[in-house]
């Protein structure tokens, strides 16, 4: 150990005249190579400038969210009045100081690409600050689409090699949550881990939807069960399992080696959860980071971290409903951890008429810019940009996306309206589910989803 300590002292003192880059790289590589050394010098490691590359996996079809994913990828689905689902992971990256980000896209990516162009382009001259969408380029030998999450990274391995980061944060783009990545990175460096997996307890009935982790008290992962309905529950808690959130931090050297080994395995499905993580569990330095320990600046110390997998219509609907509470589980009003998105030149929301049975008002609801409530009543609902609610219309427990028009005396209950829906006068939706099923998608729990229309695109015209 004295020899190692002497080496780290050399890295920090003896080459003090060398460029900062070489001092930092030497120190960090030694720390990652010797976990005990990283622990004893954790204060030094934490204060170093660690180069982190962010990669967002945003290519999922989101089939369980149909028909909201009929024309768009799941990360591009609108949420919370003015956001898209992908805004959450990108905001977490930016708020955590990770400014070098690639977004890997694949299916139905046009809506997502347009949103990234309108809301997530840095106005800076710094080359290290970028959010770059990367369409599937079929760089595999068979020129295939991405076969799994690991294959998606492997087909873009040149991006990792060119950046040569100290660590790579690989996160999904389809969850609703806030997360301080610095906490997870600190944990990763403290453990000297090859891989760190963000994890959270969930009800055991959802075991078939997640990768389930068995871990020691120190976080070391002993086993990983991918979407196994009979996966073991947490010690001392027979009602919950310890689920992977699909968010990973890899040391770069480990990531490159693991991807190369997996690509050479013909029987592999080339997925982190199905193939790579189960093989590492119990054999390598792979740790679970408990998301319950994550802390967001500006939030009370006793606040519970919020994370929702909005993979189904019901989960998407309930997550939207969470926002309208008096004290919401997901606080969108924390100025120290803002949720960023595209900015539009919308006028303010407007409420008109003050007559009995014709009063524009909204109660326990979120109303976005450009909305006009013209004598209509909105309760317990989320209204996105540019929604019109006409006289005597009733909207109750609904999620209404952009530019919908609710006609006079129409009544809506427990419905989701996709963009650009026009509800005729005197229409009722959500009151007679058997009737609704003839025209709309209705979930088992009785949520009615009304398909919308494509948004027209304005193009320039020539004067001839």
Image (cartoon, rainbow, N blue to C red):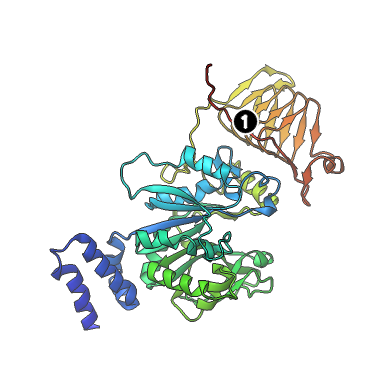
Quadrant of residue 196 in the image?
bottom left
- What residue appears at the point 34 percent right and 64 percent down from the top-left corner? 166
Considering depth in this image, is 89 or 117 the residue closer to the camera? 117
Q: Work out which residue is located at the far front of the displayed protein and give it.
A: 464
Considering depth in this image, is 202 or 2 the residue closer to the camera? 2
Let me know if residue 297 appears in the view.
no
Considering depth in this image, is 318 or 109 the residue closer to the camera? 109
- Packing grade of label 1 (10 A; few <14, some 14-19, many >=20) is few
In the image, residue 463 sits, relative to residue 242, either above or below, namely above
Report helix, strand or loop for mark 1.
Answer: loop
Quadrant of residue 335 in the image?
top left
Q: Which residue is mark 1?
A: 456
Q: How many marks?
A: 1
In the image, residue 7 sits, relative to residue 434, either above or below, namely below
Q: Where is residue 260? Give x, y as percent.
A: 46, 72
Q: Where is residue 399? Give x, y as percent.
A: 67, 39
In the image, residue 222 sits, relative to residue 373, either above or below, namely below
**Image-based side of 377 in relation to 193, left or right:** right
Q: Work out which residue is located at the far right of the displayed protein and give it.
A: 434
Q: Where is residue 4? Give x, y as percent.
A: 24, 80
In the image, residue 67 sits, relative to residue 32, either above or below, namely above
Q: Quadrant of the N terminus?
A: bottom left
Quadrant of residue 47 in the image?
bottom left
**Image-based side of 144 in relation to 420, left or right:** left
**Image-based side of 248 in relation to 23, left or right:** right
Let me know if residue 444 appears in the view.
yes
């Amino acid at each position: 150990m004295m020899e190692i300590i002497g080496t780290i002292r050399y890295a920090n003192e003896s080459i003090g005249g060398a460029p900062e880059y070489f001092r930092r790289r030497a120190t960090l590589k030694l720390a990652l190579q010797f976990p005990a050394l990283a622990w004893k010098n954790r204060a030094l490691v934490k204060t170093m400038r660690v180069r982190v590359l962010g990669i967002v996996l945003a290519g999922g079809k989101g089939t369980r969210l149909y028909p909201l994913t009929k024309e768009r990828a799941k990360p591009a689905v609108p949420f919370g009045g003015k956001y898209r689902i992908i805004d959450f992971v990108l905001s977490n990256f930016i708020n955590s100081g990770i400014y070098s980000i690639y977004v890997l896209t694949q299916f139905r990516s046009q809506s997502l690409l347009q949103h990234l162009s309108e809301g997530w382009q840095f106005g800076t001259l710094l080359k290290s600050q970028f959010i770059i969408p990367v369409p599937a380029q079929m760089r595999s030998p068979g020129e295939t689409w991405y076969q799994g999450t690991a294959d998606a990274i492997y087909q873009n391995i040149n991006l990792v090699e060119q950046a040569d980061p100290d660590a790579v944060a690989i996160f999904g783009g389809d969850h609703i949550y806030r997360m301080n990545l610095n906490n997870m990175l600190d944990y990763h460096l403290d453990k000297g881990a090859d891989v760190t997996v963000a994890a959270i307890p969930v009800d055991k009935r959802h075991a078939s939807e997640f990768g389930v982790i068995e871990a020691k008290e120190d976080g070391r992962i002993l086993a990983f069960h991918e979407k196994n309905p009979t996966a073991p529950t947490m010690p001392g808690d027979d009602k919950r399992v310890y689920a992977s959130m699909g968010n990973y931090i890899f040391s770069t050297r480990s990531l490159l080696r693991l991807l190369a080994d997996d690509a050479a395995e013909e029987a592999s499905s080339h997925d982190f959860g199905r193939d790579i993580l189960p093989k590492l569990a119990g054999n390598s330095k792979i740790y679970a980071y408990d998301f319950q320990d994550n802390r967001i600046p500006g939030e009370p110390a006793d606040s519970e971290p919020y994370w929702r997998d909005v993979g189904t219509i019901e989960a998407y609907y309930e997550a939207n409903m969470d926002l309208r509470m008096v004290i919401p589980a997901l606080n969108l009003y924390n100025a120290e951890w803002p949720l960023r998105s595209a900015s539009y030149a919308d006028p303010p929301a407007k409420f008109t008429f003050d007559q009995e049975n014709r009063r524009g008002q909204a109660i326990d609801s979120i109303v976005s810019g450009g909305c006009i409530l013209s004598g209509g009543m909105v309760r317990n609902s989320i209204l996105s940009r540019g929604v019109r609610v006409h006289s005597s219309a009733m909207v109750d427990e609904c999620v209404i996306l952009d530019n919908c028009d609710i006609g006079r005396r129409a009544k809506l209950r427990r419905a989701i309206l996709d963009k650009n829906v026009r509800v005729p006068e005197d229409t009722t939706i959500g009151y007679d589910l058997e009737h609704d099923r003839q025209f709309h998608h209705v979930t088992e729990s009785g949520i009615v989803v009304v398909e919308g229309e494509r948004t027209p695109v304005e193009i320039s015209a020539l004067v001839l």
